[in-house]
Image (cartoon, rainbow, N blue to C red):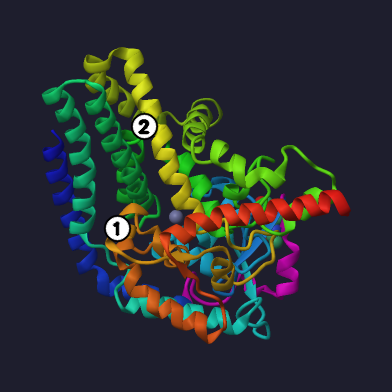
C-alpha cells in the first residue's frame, strides 16, 4: 500500500514540478518586478501618507501596513487572512514587505486579495524603508540573488526519497512485530523506529507547511495535511498559526508563541530581570537549568498533542484537520491492536511521543533559546532574524537529524526555500552579514545542546539577582 502511495506521490510531484519549470520564465519576471507590484501605479485616489502616519495605525481596531510602498488597511481583512489573524497583525503600523515575500510563494495569486485593501501609498519624499535602510536594501538584493540562482526550485526526488524513508520505517516496525513477535527487545526496537519515523515526519510536514515543495500553495497545503494529519495525527491549521507567528517575529515576547513559557521558565536577559523586580516566583527560576530536564524534553510533545487536539475539536471546530488526525489513529490502532491490544497500543504510542519529544525539544530549541529574546524592537527583517537564530554545523548526520534546521538562519530568512538548497544560500547570507557586522553564528551540535542549558542558567541567575537585590 505504501509503495503505491509513494509512486503516486512521485508522479504527481513530477508533473507539478514540471509545470513549475515550464512556468519559470513568467514567474521570475513577476518576482523580479517587485517595484511595480502589487497594483500598477499610484494609490487609490492618489492619497499619500508618511511613515509617521502609517505607524499610528497599529491598534486592534485600526491596522495599516506597507508592502512595496503601498499602504493597505488590513483592519477587516486580518480576520480572514489565511495564514492567521495574529501573524499579519504583528506587522500593523510597519513595513511588511520582507515578511510578505518571505511567506507568500505566489505573489501574483495574493495580489487579488490585496487590491481592495489599498488605501494609498507613501509620499515620494518618504524613504523606501522605515528603518535600517542599508541593511534592508542589501537583504532585498540578496533575495533577488538567491531567486536568480534558482534556489527556490525544489527537487522532487529529494522529497520523494524523504517521504519514502519515513514510510519504510513505518512499514519496518510492523514487519518486525509480524516476523519476530512482541518480546521486549522487539518492542523497544519498534519504538525506536517509530520515534525516528515520527521525528522525520515532523521535519517533512514543516517543509509542506512552509509551502516550500510545490509551486502551487494548494498542493503544499494538501500534502501538508496528509503528512501532519495522517502520518502524525496532528492539525495543520493549529501548527500553521503558531509557526508563522514564530517566523514573523522570532524570540519576541507576546508575538512569538514559542517563547511563551507560561511562567515555567524565564528566557533571555530582559524577562528574568522584569520578573525579579516584580518579585514573581512561579517556580524557583535559579534552578530552571535543572528542572528543564523534567518539564522540557519529556513533556513538550505530549502536551502539544493534547492541547492541539482539544483546540481543534472545541475551539476551532476544524473538522477537516480532525478527520486527517483521526485517520492516523485509526490506521495506528488497526495495525497495532492485534499485537498489543488497545491499552498496550496506547502505551506504545505514548512512549513514542515521549521519546520524540526529546528529539524535538533539543533540536528546535538549540537555534533560538541561546539567542536574544526580548520585547519588540522593530528591527529590519535580516537583523531581527539573525539576532534570534543561529546555525549548527553541516554534516550528513546533522542535516538528517535536524531536518536541515541546522541551517536555521537560511530557513528563517527564506522560509519558502526548499531545504536541500540552504547550503547553497549560506555563503551569500554570510557575506551580507559580514558586510554589516551582523554576527552569523555556527556551532557544533553538542555546543548547541549545551548552550540551551547554559543560557537557561544565565537567565535564572539574572532572575535571582533581581529578585533578591532590586
Ligand atoms: C480601514 O478599515 C476600517 C474597517 O473596515 C474602517 O473603519 C476605516 O475607516 C478604514 N480606514 C480607511 C482610511 O479607509
Ligand atoms: Zn519554520
Crowding near pointer 2: few (<14 within 10 Å), some, many (20+)? many
Give the residues in magenta.
35-60
- Asked if the stretch drawn in magenta spans residue 153, the answer is no
> Quarter of the image containing the N terminus?
top left
Ligand 2 shows up in the quarter that is bottom left
Q: Residue at x 50, y 64 (%)?
A: 100
Counting residues from the N terminus, which is met first, the one under dot 1 or under dot 2?
A: 2
Q: Residue at x 68, y 64 (%)?
A: 93
Q: How many numbered discs?
A: 2
Q: Which residue is mark 1?
A: 397
Q: Position of residue 267 (x, y in %)?
A: 66, 52
The image's mark for residue 251 is: none
Q: Which residue is mark 2?
A: 352
Front-most of 275 and 66?
A: 275
Q: Position of residue 262 (x, y in %)?
A: 66, 40
Can residue 33 be seen in the rendering of this structure? no
Q: Is mark 1 within 8 Å of ligand 2?
A: no
Q: Secondary structure at mark 1?
A: helix
Query: Rounded to the nearest whole Å, what is the CA distance between mark 1 and mark 2?
Result: 21 Å
Q: Is residue 175 left or right of residue 101?
A: left
Quick check: 470 above or below 190? below
Q: Secondary structure at mark 2?
A: helix
Q: Residue at x 64, y 84 (%)?
A: 124
Quick check: 263 above or below 243? above
Q: Is residue 351 left or right of residue 454?
A: left
Q: Residue at x 50, y 74 (%)?
A: 440
Q: Position of residue 246 (x, y in %)?
A: 54, 53
Q: Is mark 2 within 8 Å of ligand 2?
A: no
Can residue 278 be seen in the rendering of this structure? yes
Quick check: 60 above or below 123? above
> Quarter of the image containing the C terminus?
bottom right
Amino acid at each position: 500500500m505504501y509503495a503505491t502511495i509513494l509512486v503516486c506521490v512521485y508522479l504527481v510531484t513530477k508533473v507539478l514540478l514540471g509545470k513549475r519549470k515550464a512556468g519559470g520564465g513568467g514567474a521570475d519576471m513577476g518576482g523580479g518586478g517587485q517595484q511595480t507590484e502589487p497594483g500598477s501605479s499610484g494609490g487609490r485616489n492618489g492619497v499619500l501618507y508618511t511613515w509617521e502616519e502609517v505607524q499610528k495605525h497599529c491598534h486592534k481596531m485600526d491596522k495599516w501596513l506597507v508592502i512595496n510602498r503601498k499602504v493597505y488597511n488590513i483592519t477587516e481583512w486580518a480576520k480572514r487572512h489565511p495564514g492567521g489573524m495574529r501573524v499579519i497583525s504583528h506587522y500593523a503600523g510597519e513595513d511588511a514587505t520582507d515578511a510578505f515575500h518571505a511567506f507568500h510563494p505566489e505573489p501574483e495569486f495574493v495580489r487579488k486579495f490585496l487590491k481592495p485593501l489599498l488605501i494609498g501609498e507613501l509620499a515620494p519624499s518618504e524613504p523606501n524603508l522605515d528603518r535600517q535602510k542599508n541593511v534592508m536594501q542589501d537583504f532585498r538584493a540578496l533575495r533577488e540573488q538567491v531567486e536568480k540562482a534558482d534556489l527556490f526550485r525544489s527537487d522532487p526526488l529529494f522529497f520523494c526519497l524523504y517521504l519514502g524513508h519515513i514510510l519504510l520505517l513505518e512499514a519496518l516496525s510492523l514487519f518486525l512485530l509480524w516476523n519476530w513477535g512482541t518480546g521486549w527487545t522487539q518492542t523497544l526496537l519498534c519504538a525506536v523506529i517509530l520515534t525516528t519515523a515520527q521525528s522525520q515526519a515532523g521535519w517533512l510536514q514543516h517543509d509542506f507547511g512552509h509551502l516550500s515543495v510545490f509551486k502551487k500553495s494548494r498542493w503544499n497545503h494538501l500534502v501538508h495535511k496528509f503528512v501532519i494529519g495522517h502520518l502524525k495525527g496532528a492539525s495543520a491549521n493549529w501548527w500553521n498559526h503558531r509557526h508563522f507567528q514564530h517566523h514573523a517575529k522570532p524570540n519576541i515576547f507576546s508575538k512569538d508563541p514559542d517563547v511563551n513559557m507560561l511562567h515555567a521558565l524565564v528566557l533571555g536577559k530582559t524577562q528574568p530581570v522584569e520578573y525579579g523586580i516584580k518579585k514573581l516566583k512561579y517556580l524557583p527560576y535559579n534552578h530552571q537549568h535543572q528542572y528543564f530536564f523534567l518539564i522540557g524534553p519529556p513533556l513538550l510533545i505530549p502536551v502539544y498533542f493534547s492541547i492541539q487536539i482539544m483546540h481543534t475539536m472545541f475551539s476551532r471546530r476544524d473538522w477537516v484537520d480532525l478527520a486527517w488526525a483521526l485517520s492516523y489513529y485509526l490506521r495506528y490502532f488497526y495495525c497495532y491492536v492485534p499485537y498489543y491490544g488497545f491499552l498496550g497500543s496506547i502505551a506504545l504510542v505514548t512512549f513514542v511521543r515521549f521519546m520524540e519529544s526529546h528529539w524535538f525539544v533539543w533540536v528546535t530549541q538549540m537555534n533560538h533559546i541561546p539567542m536574544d529574546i526580548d520585547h519588540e524592537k522593530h528591527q529590519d527583517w535580516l537583523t531581527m532574524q539573525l539576532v534570534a537564530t543561529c546555525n549548527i554545523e553541516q554534516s550528513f548526520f546533522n542535516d538528517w537529524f535536524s531536518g536541515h534546521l541546522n541551517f536555521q538562519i537560511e530557513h528563517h530568512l527564506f522560509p519558502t526555500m526548499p531545504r536541500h538548497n540552504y547550503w547553497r544560500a549560506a555563503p551569500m547570507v554570510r557575506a551580507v552579514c559580514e558586510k554589516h557586522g551582523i554576527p552569523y553564528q555556527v556551532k557544533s551540535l553538542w555546543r548547541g545542546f549545551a548552550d540551551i542549558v547554559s543560557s537557561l542558567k544565565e537567565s535564572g541567575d539574572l532572575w535571582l539577582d533581581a529578585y533578591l537585590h532590586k
